[in-house]
Amino acid sequence: MVVAVVALAIGGFAIGTTEFVTMGVLPDIAEGVGVDIPSAGHVISVYALGVVVGAPVIAALSARLPRRALLIGLMAAFLVGNGLTALAPGYGTLLLARFLTGLPHGAYFGVASLVAASLVAPHLRGRAVSSVMLGLAAAMLTGVPAATWLGQQFGWRSAYWTVVVLAAMTVAAVLAVVPSSPGRSEATVRGELGALRRPQVLLTLLVGIVGFGGMFALYSYIAPVVTDVAELSRGTVPVVLLAYGAGGVVGTVLGGRLADLSLFRSLVGSLVVLGVLLVGVALTSPYPVALFVGVFLVSVAASTLAICLQMRLMETAGEAQMLGAALNHSALNLANALGAWLGGLVIAAGLGYRAPSVVGAGLAALGLLPLAISAVLRRRAGRTPVRLAPAPTRQVRVPAA
């Protein structure tokens, strides 16, 4: 079981590396394809769009397929997408390659989460899912810095060739050690997408889009926070990102355990803590030590929240658990776009680089609103009386006098 989960986590490591390494080599990409940096930033956006579109579509269409074969197919498509990225001759083909690469992202995590959960006892499912997601956190800690260094030293295309190698390793590992697992033969596209009609699913997605957007409001502009607010050198930025990656590893492990203990309470608690910590970063970011600690703790809270959101969607999606798990990654990528956009607005308004953290705290607070509605619905569902069938009447014969 452990070896199988590790094999699945390697895929998460590959996906996390390709998702975030683009930010590290963005100037090199811009120079390589002959565009300015803002235009090169669209490479990040189209990948996120691919995740948002691909997760529900692929999950719904493939629910009946054997899960190990589906994992291999998704990772093979991911491998091809990264290969096309590395070979892209110009800006237009690069955008198309990144969109295609993003398509299998959410579906892979959805299938991998289900497979991992099926390998353990019910009370350990949160830990199993968090172990798969640990690959994503480990990528932030080691994969992204290493691939960024390779891209800066040997050209930006080398970063994506590295991901191609990681994807090939995942395919081999899944083939070797992940047990075969059947799909749901009775699943239909209409039935899978029917999960989107469930109020609890929609509310949880809204929590992810809005509440988790708070983290991205800070993360998207962490470089100028380090250099302009804390007045540290540009070379310090990777060290701060390393602190963020370490927090992601801790938060992912912690999130799995908290989800197994009390999922809904952990979801509420992690969102509240995230909001408080973002306020703390806004207040203390001029002080280097406080900035390092704040970024680390924000990452812990955000990663815990991501795991709880994943488990909550799997819980509320009914039979469409794979779709629920995949949708979490669509929601988080929409959160990425929302947080970065709102953070950019306040910076453009002249409010400074500390303002995105305040915006992030506001988004975390707004995320509590759909969570409160979800709690009310849960309570009402718990209080709904169980209707019992009427007891059969018995005819009693009264003896004649």
Image: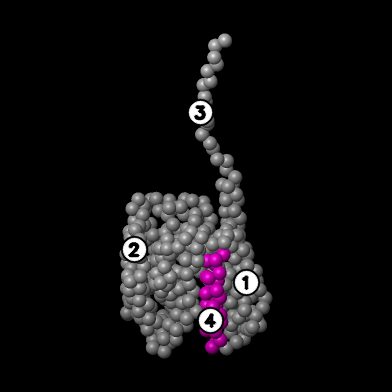
Q: Which x, y percent locates residue 174?
A: 35, 70
Q: What whole-number distance in Å separates the C-alpha atoms at marks 4 and 2?
A: 36 Å
Q: What whole-number distance in Å separates the C-alpha atoms at marks 3 and 2?
A: 49 Å
Task: Name the one closer to the observer, 248 or 386.
Answer: 386
Q: Residue furthest top?
A: 401
At a point 49% along the width and 54% down the height, the residue shown is 316
Instruction: Select label 3 or label 2 by which is in front.
Output: 3
Type of amino acid under label 3: Pro
Q: Helix, strand, or loop for circle 3?
A: loop
Task: Name the one closer to the observer, 218 or 75.
Answer: 75
At a point 58% along the width and 56% down the height, the residue shown is 370
Q: Which x, y percent locates residue 277?
A: 63, 71
Is the C-beta separation of discs 2 and 1 under 8 Å? no
Instruction: Select label 4 or label 1 by which is in front.
Output: 4
Q: Helix, strand, or loop for circle 2?
A: loop
Q: What whole-number distance in Å separates the C-alpha atoms at marks 4 and 3?
A: 69 Å
Task: Name the one closer to the observer, 122 or 258.
Answer: 122
**Mark 3 sits on what residue?**
392
At a point 57% along the width and 64% down the height, the residue shown is 258
**Mark 1 sits on what residue?**
278
Type of amino acid under label 2: Ser
Note whether 28 is above or below 250 in the view shown. below
Q: Which mark is residue 180?
A: 2
Q: Earlier in the sequence, mark 1 or mark 3?
A: 1
Q: Helix, strand, or loop for circle 4?
A: helix
**Magenta part of the protein: which range?**
234-258
Instruction: Select label 4 or label 2 by which is in front.
Output: 2
Q: Which x, y percent locates residue 304?
A: 55, 68
Q: Which mark is residue 242?
A: 4
**Drawn side of residue 203 relative to residue 91, left or right:** right
